[in-house]
Image (cartoon, helix red, strand yellow):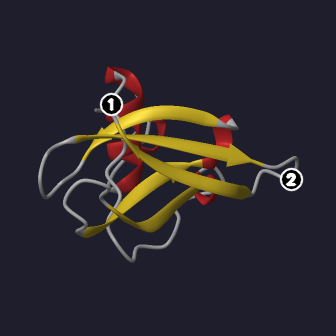
Amino acid sequence: MKSRRDKPREPSGRDAAREIDARFGLEPVFEPGAEPLNSLDSACSLRPVQCPYCGEPFETLLDLSAGSARYVEDCPVCCRPIELQLEIDDDGDLSSLTLLRTD
């Protein structure tokens, strides 16, 4: 007969959310102003940028852990596609960020 101590502990809170994200291949949710959850999260950086179409400022989450990258993200204001070009230096820090119109 097993006691309650033998039962595996079910993750709760942030641990449960991370387990679900990992299991289903979901991207984690980041709250503005929240502290990084762990050392991997510290490679993510919330940066203020300005849409090259409508000129409205917004914040975007940059993942610096993957090195230099190019990807497209829609403006949260005007919904037009913006190409983001990240250049990461040898220390893993952001050396440049360029936002381009895709038209």
Q: Secondary structure at mark 2?
A: loop
Tag 1 near tag 2, CB within 8 Å: no
Placement of 79 over or under 93, stated as above or below: above
Which of 26 and 75 lies nearest the eye of the viewer? Answer: 75
Tell me which residue sits at (42%, 48%) in the image.
15
Which of 83 and 60 lies nearest the eye of the viewer? Answer: 83
Quarter of image, res 22: top left
Which of 79 and 9 lies nearest the eye of the viewer? Answer: 79
Quarter of the rendering occupied by the C terminus:
top left
Residue neighbourhood size for the residue with mark 2, other residues' Cα within 10 Å, grouped as few (<14), some (14–19), many (≥20)? few
Q: CA distance from mark 1 to mark 2?
A: 28 Å
For badge 2, the amino acid type reads Asp
Going by the picture, which residue comes out furthest to the right? 90
Left or right for 57, reference 5: left
Quarter of image, res 44: bottom right
Residue neighbourhood size for the residue with mark 1, other residues' Cα within 10 Å, grouped as few (<14), some (14–19), many (≥20)? few
Q: Which residue is mark 2?
A: 91
Tell me which residue sits at (13%, 58%) in the image.
77
Going by the picture, which residue comes out furthest to the front? 103
Tell me which residue sits at (47%, 35%) in the image.
6
Going by the picture, which residue comes out furthest to the bottom? 33
Q: Which residue is mark 1?
A: 26
Placement of 20 over or under 34, stated as above or below: above
Q: Secondary structure at mark 1?
A: loop
